[in-house]
Image (cartoon, grey):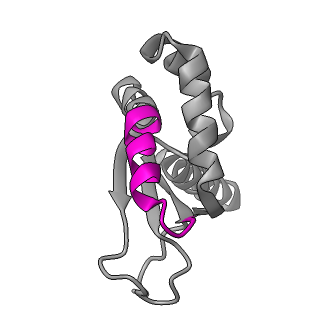
């Protein structure tokens, strides 16, 4: 009887682990853009990086992309001026190759301009940090 109980508990644990591994996984990408350059940063982001994210959404690697910014200057601590919240298919795809380089080559045949504009976008950033988010379930 004990062996059956242990096997049942193991099966439940493995199922729960598999379900958790397959659950969508969110990462928040925060940017603090240098003062006076927000509009240029956003223009370059939507021109070059957003289409790459959308292509990953079409492939199924990404489930959702939300782009947000504070409504008013000085909201909260003012640590960020731009936020991209990406919901990935699952946690495993974070460590897997993204295919971003191949996507960029396909979407932007003029790679020299693409690289130059992406370099400029990064020059406009004062700070950047990524925050993998873990869901918190309310107590039962």
Question: Is any part of residue 66 visible from this angle?
Answer: yes
Residue 46 falls within the magenta-colored stretch: yes
Vertically, is 63 above or below 25?
above
| Residue at image point 55% right, 67% down | 134
Question: Is any part of residue 86 visible from this angle?
Answer: no
Residue 95 falls within the magenta-colored stretch: no
| Residue at image point 39% right, 35% down | 47
Front-lying residue, 58 or 126: 126
Which portion, as a residue range, is magenta?
Answer: 33-50
Question: Total label count?
Answer: 0
The image shows residue 114 at horizontal and vertical percentages of 54, 25
The image shows residue 50 at horizontal and vertical percentages of 40, 38
| Residue at image point 60% right, 42% down | 120
The image shows residue 88 at horizontal and vertical percentages of 47, 44
Q: Quadrant of residue 85?
A: bottom left
Front-lying residue, 32 or 96: 32
């Amino acid at each position: 009887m004990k062996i059956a109980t242990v096997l049942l508990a193991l099966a439940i644990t493995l199922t729960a682990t598999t379900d958790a591994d397959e659950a969508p996984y969110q990462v928040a990408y925060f940017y603090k853009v240098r003062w006076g350059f927000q509009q240029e940063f956003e223009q370059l982001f939507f021109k070059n990086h957003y289409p790459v994210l959308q292509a990953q959404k079409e492939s199924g690697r990404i489930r959702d992309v939300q782009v947000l910014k504070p409504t008013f200057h000085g909201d909260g601590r003012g640590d960020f001026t731009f936020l991209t919240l990406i919901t990935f298919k699952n946690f495993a795809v974070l460590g897997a190759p993204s295919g971003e380089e191949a996507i960029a080559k396909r979407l932007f045949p003029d790679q020299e301009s693409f690289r130059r504009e992406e370099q400029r976008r990064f020059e406009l950033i004062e700070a950047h940090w990524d925050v993998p988010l873990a869901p918190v379930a309310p107590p039962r």
